[in-house]
């Protein structure tokens, strides 16, 4: 028979241990353990060793953090910021996506614009919006530049890149020592942005670099512009594969800039000479006179052809392959030309606007305008709509936006609406979105306001229903050609 034996003991003591472990605490533990082993080894050899001093506390600053962790936190913070803004501006986001003005059903030839977000930034409240450019790669991203048109009131400038997903703060911003007058985002490489400044300097920004300094600057380049740079535009890469862009300045020159190993190299494309104006010196020597370039616009299908507008009201048709002379030149306006815009669907139609209160529609190689519209105020900007061959918008300094549809009314705008208080500020720029039914307008207080177009302002022909992109393009071409045939009839 087996006998059982059992002993009861006290349970061993237990305790809960918790701590935060990171790379620095692990390093300190291994370091103290290594020093203890070294001390025991010396004691075993019979050598005295002084007690090591107490380690000083280690203060870990943000600069010592891992760079990848900082980028990760930055992206997460940006995502959270957009979520908060989406909740804050939920009503505006719903209007942007779904609201349609029901009153358009009772107004066949009239439309309205609905104010949505207002993009503002504290450092630019005393500056004017000088240019707006949409990104062709990211439909929600656009660039805005800020400066001053006042010759005696020049100070600093800013360039900001905004997203429709975050109207409260720019995705990127850079302050400059001179006013920024123009901007363009590269069509293929959207991280490259070129700007032109009031002091004649042009620079290239890269949004991929960690710093905010320009990667290229023309400040030290011999032969750079001697006056305000009023327009810049990226061109196709040259035969060597180098990026390049063009600029026009009030000094009367059009320059091509090439990016070669983080340096800018210039080539003068053309000089806006005025042979009809003779300026004789004291000794009878004839001094050549240059026109003041105020804007230009490159042809949408032929990148070698471009139009240049001047402060004298002239339009020069030029080519990048023929720098010695112009293809054609004519007097378009009585005062300075502020903007030129090519039609998206017809390669020979373009619009100009001027300080003489008029917007004119032209056909290439024809010296007389097809349409002339008097808007009763200086016109700061004009832009063709990317969705229609007969729709364009113009902004006047009295705070009104004028939207025309020549297929509906050839004499009056189908929308003339005040969107800015004329007593407080003046409107400077207008730009259609390339993908959304909205238009942006800028003013002299540094604000960029987005406006949604009502259905009557973006009405499409019945034939366009269920049509593919190629057929839509053909329909718009047929619509503008029909309009041109009617305009040409009296002259036939």
Image: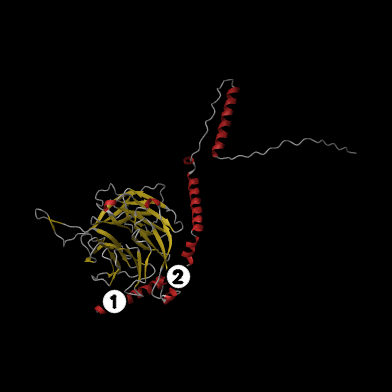
Whole-number angstrom distance, CA of label 2 to CA of label 1: 32 Å
Q: Is residue 144 left or right of residue 310?
A: right
Quadrant location of residue 430?
A: bottom left
Q: Residue furthest right?
A: 1
Residue at the spot 44% in from the left edge and 75% down from the top edge: 105
Q: Is residue 112 above or below residue 234?
A: below
Residue placed under numbered mark 1 in the picture: 487
Where is residue 456? Give x, y as percent: 41, 72
Residue at the spot 32% in from the left edge and 76% down from the top edge: 483
Q: Residues within 10 Å of mark 1 (few under 14, many from 20)?
A: some
Where is residue 114? Give x, y as percent: 43, 65
Identify the mark at residue 101; answer none if there is no mark: 2
Residue 200 at least partly seen: no
Which quadrant holds the N terminus? top right
Q: Is residue 356 left or right of residue 12?
A: left
Identify the mark at residue 174; answer none if there is no mark: none
Q: Is residue 314 above or below residue 82?
A: below
Q: Residues within 10 Å of mark 2 (few under 14, many from 20)?
A: some
Q: Nearer the viewer, residue 164 or 482?
A: 164
Which sits earlier in the primary sequence, circle 2 or circle 1?
2
Where is residue 352? Give x, y as percent: 29, 66
């Amino acid at each position: 028979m087996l006998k059982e034996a059992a002993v009861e003991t006290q349970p061993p003591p237990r305790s809960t241990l918790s701590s935060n472990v990171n790379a620095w605490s692990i390093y300190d533990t291994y370091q103290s353990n290594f020093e203890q082993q070294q001390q025991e080894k010396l004691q075993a050899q019979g050598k005295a060793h002084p007690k090591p001093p107490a380690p000083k506390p280690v203060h870990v600053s943000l600069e010592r953090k891992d760079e990848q962790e900082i980028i990760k936190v930055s992206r997460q913070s940006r995502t959270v910021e957009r979520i908060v803004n989406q909740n804050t501006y939920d009503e505006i986001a719903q209007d942007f996506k779904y609201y349609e003005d029901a009153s358009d059903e009772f107004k066949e030839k009239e439309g309205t614009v609905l104010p949505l977000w207002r993009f503002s930034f504290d450092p630019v409240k005393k500056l004017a919006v000088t240019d707006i450019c949409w990104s062709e790669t990211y439909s929600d991203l656009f660039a805005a530049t800020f400066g001053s048109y006042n010759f005696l009131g020049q100070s600093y400038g800013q360039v900001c890149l905004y997203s429709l997903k975050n109207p409260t703060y720019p995705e990127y911003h850079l302050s400059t020592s001179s006013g920024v007058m123009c901007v363009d985002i590269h069509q293929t490489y959207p991280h490259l942005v070129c700007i032109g400044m009031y002091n004649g300097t042009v620079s290239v920004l890269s949004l991929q670099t960690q710093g905010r300094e320009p990667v290229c600057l023309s400040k030290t380049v011999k032969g750079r512009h001697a006056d305000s740079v009023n327009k810049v535009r990226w061109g196709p890469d040259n035969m060597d594969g180098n990026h390049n862009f063009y600029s026009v300045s009030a000094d009367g020159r059009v320059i091509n800039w090439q990016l070669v190993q983080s340096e800018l190299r210039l080539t003068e494309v053309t000089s806006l000479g005025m042979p009809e104006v003779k300026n004789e010196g004291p000794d009878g020597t004839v001094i050549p006179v240059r026109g003041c370039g105020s804007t230009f616009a490159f042809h949408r299908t032929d990148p070698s052809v471009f139009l240049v507008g001047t402060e004298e009201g002239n339009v020069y048709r030029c080519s990048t392959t023929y720098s010695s002379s112009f293809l054609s030149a004519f007097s378009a306006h009585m005062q300075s030309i502020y903007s030129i815009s090519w039609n998206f669907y017809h390669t020979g139609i373009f619009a100009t606007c001027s300080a003489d209160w008029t917007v004119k529609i032209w056909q290439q190689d024809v010296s007389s305008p097809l349409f002339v519209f008097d808007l009763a105020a200086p016109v700061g900007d004009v832009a063709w709509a990317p969705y229609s061959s007969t729709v364009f918008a113009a902004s006047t300094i009295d705070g009104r936006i004028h939207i025309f549809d020549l297929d509906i009314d050839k004499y009056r705008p189908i929308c003339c609406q005040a969107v800015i208080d004329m007593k407080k500020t003046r409107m400077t720029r207008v730009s259609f979105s390339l993908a959304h039914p909205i238009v942006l307008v800028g003013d002299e207080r540094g604000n960029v306001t987005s406006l949604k177009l009502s259905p009557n302002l973006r009405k499409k022909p019945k034939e366009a229903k269920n049509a593919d992109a190629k057929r839509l393009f053909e329909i718009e071409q047929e619509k503008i050609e029909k309009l041109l045939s009617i305009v040409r009839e009296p002259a036939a």
